[in-house]
Amino acid sequence: MLTIPASALAQISDYFKVLSEQSRLQVLCALKDGEKNVTELIAHTGLKQANISKHLKILTQAGIVERQPEGVAVYYRIADPIIFDLCELVCQRFEMQLEERSQQLKNLEQLRQL
Amino acid sequence: MLTIPASALAQISDYFKVLSEQSRLQVLCALKDGEKNVTELIAHTGLKQANISKHLKILTQAGIVERQPEGVAVYYRIADPIIFDLCELVCQRFEMQLEERSQQLKNLEQLRQL
DNA sequence: ATATTATATAACTATATAGTGATATAGTTG
DNA sequence: CAACTATATCACTATATAGTTATATAATAT
């Protein structure tokens, strides 16, 4: 059996950790349709300034967003579109689970009819 | 602009949170090539019994693994193969970043030659 | 019934981090 | 330069959870 090196797993888990916070996903969703500066992101997400600034730093360090100062403002944009593929996969999974459950309910219904 | 409901984002971030721990990824990797009982998982991962038991509970509750008692042992298996697609995507991303960096290094080299 | 083994849980400690208010820094304007 | 605005950082609190030891539970065998 082949064992994946711990360092590789740590890299992957660190990446998922960045995506494992609702506030950061909110920020990423707000950036999905184009770059925004911090003030705009605050308006979109309702997060407080200091908080969103910390999240943006984390996202930037992970290479998921890019930072671009423009005058006194700082614009952020998605640097790593695969995050949306990841979310898509997870959502599909949730949908599948929902379908399974509704199918199970139907089966139960049918049993009850007998 | 459409705002994704907070509850949906929370579901997604919760899912990523389950995958954001190195120990749990170790367990999942150990299960990749077939079901194993807890004792076997302990041997594969080196994690302690109580610890792995907690992680297995978290993975089970998330619907990522399935639990099946057999006699005194309990076997676990992957219930949700998309986790490997997710890891694959993340790994591809890391590879791409590595390639980009090595390309940048090459470009620097060429500049230095001038 | 008792002993043994496999797994789960409880109680605890240590650590990481999200959120917050206050402050610092840097670009812009008058 | 001073005043203003946008963003980043600091210091702090509160909370969540990974890991650990000890204990409980459940299946099996003697």
Image: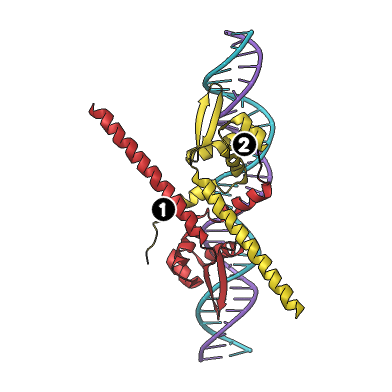
Chain colours: A yellow, B red, C cyan, D purple
Secondary element at tag 1: helix
Please tell me which residue lies in front, D3 or B86: B86
Q: Is residue B112 visible?
A: yes
Q: Residue B94: image x %, image y %?
A: 41, 47
Instruction: Return the x and y of residue A77 as percentages of the image width and height.
Output: 53, 35
Name the residue that disc number 1 marks.
A8
Q: Chain of mark 2?
A: A
Do the dots labelled 1 and 2 sit on one chain? yes
Kindly give the residue lying farthest to the left in the view shown: B113
Badge 1 vs badge 2, beta-carbon distance below 8 Å: no
Q: Quadrant of the N terminus of chain A?
A: bottom left
Residue drawn at x 70%, y 69% is A105
Residue A113 appears left or right of D9:
right
**Image vertical order of residue A99 relative to residue B102, above or below:** below
Using the rendered image of the protein, determine whether residue A47 is visible from the camera's viewpoint. Answer: no
Q: Which residue is mark 2?
A: A51
Q: Amino acid at mark 2?
A: Asn
